[in-house]
Amino acid sequence: MTNIFDEQLTKTHSSLRTIDWKNNIVIMIDQTKLPNKLEYVEFSDYHDVANAIKNLVVRGAPAIGVSGAFGLALAALQSKAKTKEGLLEDLGKARKVLFETRPTAVNLAWALDRIMMVAKEGKDVPTIKESVINAAKKMAEEDVQTNKKMGKHGAELFENNDTIMTHCNAGALATVGYGTALGVIRATKESGKQIKVIATETRPVMQGSRLTAFELKHDGIDVSLIADTAVGYVMAKGLVTKVIVGADRILRTGHVYNKIGTYQIALIARQHKIPFYVAAPLSTFDLKSNPEDVIIEQRKASEVTAVAGKKTAPDDIGVINPAFDMTPPELVTYIITEAGIAKPPFVESIKKLFE
Ligand code: MRU
């Protein structure tokens, strides 16, 4: 694992580029170092990619998906198999390691399955290796294009002088580039509308202050930071006109799984009649599961008992640390995707998006 700094890479697509593939190596921004250092890490072993996903070096549903795909591309290169069957077996093992990193974001399974399908279609070892790498690279490029399409659809919902609240980081850093919720914000600004953003800190690991505030400042978008506990205050004061968040998984019923804290923001927004929008690509939809099937990732206690490595709670305190929560469809105004905007009743409108 080495660190490189490539200013040019960050400028791709006029916003940060989170993951890339160069000379058979995966390059990603180390998001654990932000906002203090913009550092890149390089991986040539898929086990390191799996660890990077687990440890939040790379995070955000679409970024995790593309990282998984590149992980499989590395696994293909690492495989010493001489037959198609042997290579598929090695890829199957790598798929399991990558899949088991984080359970809630459905984009990971989606991306891994897509690459496995490409591998199964290949006729021999060299063609499979080549097609797996090409499919992963294509997926990364498609991610940016998808976000731009989503941005165009979503921008129509925003007006001049809107102040938009967002939670966690659903930006360029959560995708390959441009972002989902922040992609819509970028597209709104690019369409000439004056907008302001309010970003929540997003405890416990501060994706809002470390990542969203960082990337919006990087792109010159007006952003103010609030503590998570100030959401009710700013909404009651009339300081927020719309909310937009990303998602890790959306069910066919419109149940939205996103960063812990999203549900309470949706509840307060409803109390103050503020529209609550979700922006996510079709790869974030899970049309098969019901709410009781979805596993909410539980993360380590130290994320809650310390801030920036400094202890803020007594030793041996019990901790509940879910990474995500579920916002029920009745609190969601619209869901913005690359295929259009889904409006209630979501069972019908989501079905249409996939037709
Ligand atoms: O734990 P994280 O940082 O991976 O959680 C990320 C989120 O909850 C994002 O809002 C979600 O993945 C949407 S990203 C476009």
Image: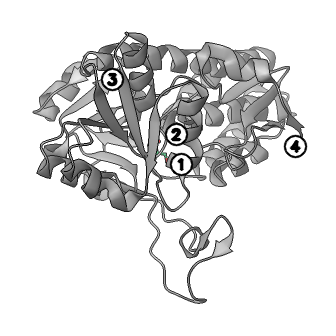
Q: Which mark is residue 1?
A: 4
In the rendered structure, which amino acid carries the disc numbered 2?
Thr
Q: Which residue is mark 1?
A: 209
Is the distance from the Cβ of mark 2 to the nearest ligand 1 atom less than 8 Å?
no
Cα distance, mark 2 to mark 1? 6 Å
Going from N to C along the chain, the mark reached first, 4 or 1, is 4
CB atoms of marks 3 and 2 within 8 Å: no
The answer to which of 225 and 90 lies nearer the viewer is: 225
Image coordinates for residue 253, horizontal then vertical, percent: 19, 40
Horizontal side of residue 312 vs 161, given as left or right: right
Image coordinates for residue 73, horizontal then vertical, percent: 73, 28
Q: Nearer the viewer, mark 4 or mark 1?
A: 1
Looking at the image, the residue that sits furthest to the top is: 191
Q: Which residue is mark 3?
A: 337
Q: Nearer the viewer, mark 4 or mark 2?
A: 2
Q: Residue at position x 41%, y 17% from top?
A: 189
Cα distance, mark 1 to mark 3? 25 Å
SS of the residue under disc 4: loop
Task: Name the image quarter holding residue 215.
Answer: top right
Cα distance, mark 3 to mark 2? 20 Å
Q: Residue at position x 12%, y 32% from top?
A: 344
Going from N to C along the chain, the mark reached first, 3 or 2, is 2
